[in-house]
Amino acid sequence: MSSGAPSTDGEQSLRGSNLRLGYHGVPVVHEAAITLRAGSVTALVGPNGSGKSTLLRALARLHPITAGVVHLAGGTAAAGLPAREFARRVTLLAQSRPVPNGVTVRDVVGYGRHPYRGRWRADDPQGPAVIARAMDVTGVAAMADRPVDELSGGELQRVWLATCLAQDTPVLLLDEPTTFLDLRYQVEILDLVRDLADDHDVAVGVVLHDLNQAAAVADEVVLLHDGRVRAAGSPAEVFTEQALTETYGIRIEVSTDPVNGLVNTRPMGRHATRIPV
């Protein structure tokens, strides 16, 4: 089990140190540390209630920090930046967002340009090209003129991701981005996450429930349990049978794919060894 050494040498884009977070005075995250690096994907995993989403929201300045500090590249304290400047550096795809009625996909994706716009859209000359590219890479360009309240859950999820991409920040935080997506789009979204890190040097922090997806897409994983970071490091370092079994409360077998070298996890329920008839 790793003590938390990062698995990549990319430039530090965001770091949370000794973070304590809570709700109504009740602590839910304790002395957590996390580092997101340019060109790297960091996956936050753990059972429900372990503090993954709360920690991600704190990194995005959407949850108050009881103690600790978040720094951006160059050692800049996130708390000291004006809202517009912070929004040019960090964006978050939350689990749920209100769906506007009668607003087209193109206009919703355009919301991502808010940090760059003044009163008039002409203040953002790069906006149209960035919006078009964001819609293209997320596969929503063909529905650009459709109202978002007519979309399926999976289509809407891709539109929200396009909105985040249109914000064009060096740090991208994603809270369960594959929710509501069928298998094809789960794979395509995770491929896109990998592309953003590899080809555009984005620092990505993503909450995932599927351990095998995390092992496939992430350079580093952070395993949380009861609001504490139990382990951080590469998937091979963190995803041990002992750590996962103790964290999730169910026996989880771990193996390595002999072809691609990726870690595979298998929860062992009562029927895990059933022989098909």
Image: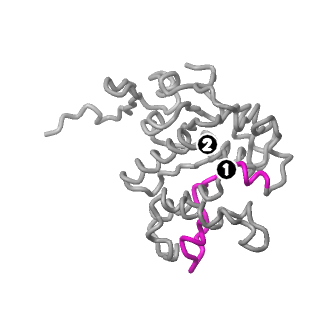
Location of residue 176 in the rendering, given as x and y in whole percent from the top left corner: 53, 49
The answer to whether marks 1 and 2 mark residues whose Cβ atoms lie closer than 8 Å is yes
Q: Residue at x 78, y 38 (%)?
A: 71
Q: How many marks?
A: 2
Callout 2 secondary element: loop
Res 11 → quadrant: top right
Res 22 → quadrant: top right
The mark found on residue 202 in the picture is 2
**Bounds of the magenta segment:** 85-109
Location of residue 14 in the rendering, given as x and y in whole percent from the top left corner: 71, 38
Residue where numbered disc 1 is placed: 169
Check the image and report above or below for 90 versus 227. Answer: below
Location of residue 156 in the rendering, given as x and y in whole percent from the top left corner: 50, 65
Q: Residue at x 49, y 76 (%)?
A: 146
Q: Can residue 217 be seen by looking at this rendering?
A: yes
Callout 1 secondary element: loop
The mark found on residue 189 in the picture is none
Res 268 → quadrant: top left
Check the image and report above or below for 248 versus 150. Answer: above
Check the image and report above or below for 120 versus 41. Answer: below
Of the residues shown, which amino acid type is indicated by label 1? Answer: Thr
Residue 224 lies in the magenta-colored region: no
Distance between mark 1 and mark 2 Cα atoms: 8 Å
Q: Nearer the viewer, residue 254 or 82?
A: 82
Q: Residue at x 45, y 60 (%)?
A: 139
Check the image and report above or below for 1 versus 17. Answer: above
Q: Residue furthest right?
A: 80
Q: Residue furthest left?
A: 277
77 vs 217, left or right, is right
